[in-house]
Image (cartoon, grey):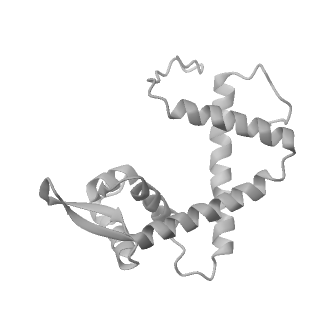
């Protein structure tokens, strides 16, 4: 599908969804590539999986089994990934207060700092890309993303309709 730059009041929700789902992976690849180039000599640069884990743990503590399920991997595979983050002193394991058999993972101060640095770097890359748009297109992008952000942060339930793309 070829996307133009002209503003379309008649774009359907399905067309918007297709554009969003076609755009986001490319944006993430661009950011990841630029960050790999920027930090190519930095041994502390986390992998994308590690960065995602840092972001998840920055939001709240998680158990190993929760992280494994969220990443669709086995707990033993997730444990190896967590071991690397623990060795880097970005993640700490603690015992859950309500269940001593359960291990809870959380970011250390160094983990929070590493996450913040990566978020800042990713925003720099995205900002450099967005800066190439003219002011009008940046404003439209901001308005659209703000509307989507608001929608995602409301508690209204989403029901998916027919294959034709209707969402109610």
Q: Position of residue 82 (x, y in %)?
A: 35, 68
Picture residue at 41% right of the left edge, 70% below the top: 109
Q: Is residue 124 left or right of residue 118?
A: right
| Residue under the point 33% across and 62% down | 106
Can residue 147 be seen from the camera position used here? yes
The image shows a total of numbered marks equal to: 0
**In-front residue for pair 97/12:** 97
Outermost residue to the front:
109
Q: Is residue 111 left or right of residue 62?
A: right
Quarter of the picture containing the N terminus is top right
Q: Position of residue 43 (x, y in %)?
A: 54, 81
Q: Is residue 3 above or below residue 119?
A: above
Q: Tell me which corner region of the image, top left, top right, bottom left or bottom right, holds residue 35.
A: bottom right
Q: x, y percentage for residue 81? A: 37, 68
Say whether residue 125 is left or right of residue 71: right
Residue 37: image location, x then y, percent: 68, 73
- Name the residue located 62 percent from the left edge and 83 percent from the top edge: 41
Q: Quadrant of residue 145?
A: top right
Residue 26 in the figure: left or right of residue 110:
right
Q: Is residue 1 visible?
A: no
Q: Which of the two residues, 36 or 147, is positioned nearer the viewer here?
A: 147
Q: Is residue 139 above or below residue 50?
A: above
Q: Residue at x 85, y 38 (%)?
A: 136
With respect to residue 155, does 55 lie above or below?
below
């Amino acid at each position: 599908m070829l996307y133009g730059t002209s503003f379309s009041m008649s774009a359907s929700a399905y067309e918007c969804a297709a554009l969003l789902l076609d755009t986001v992976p490319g944006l993430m690849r661009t950011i990841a590539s630029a960050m790999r180039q920027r930090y190519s000599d930095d041994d502390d640069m986390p992998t994308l999986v590690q960065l995602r884990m840092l972001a998840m743990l920055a939001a709240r503590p998680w158990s190993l089994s929760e992280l494994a399920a969220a990443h669709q991997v086995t707990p033993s595979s997730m444990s190896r990934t967590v071991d690397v983050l623990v060795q880097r002193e970005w993640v700490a394991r603690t015992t859950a207060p309500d269940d001593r058999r359960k291990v809870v993972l959380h970011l250390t101060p160094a983990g929070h700092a590493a996450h913040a640095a990566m978020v800042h770097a990713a925003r720099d890359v995205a900002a450099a890309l967005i800066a190439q748009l003219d002011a009008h297109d940046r404003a439209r992008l901001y308005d659209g993303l703000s509307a989507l952000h608001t929608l995602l942060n409301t508690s209204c339930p989403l029901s998916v309709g027919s294959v034709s793309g209707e969402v109610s």
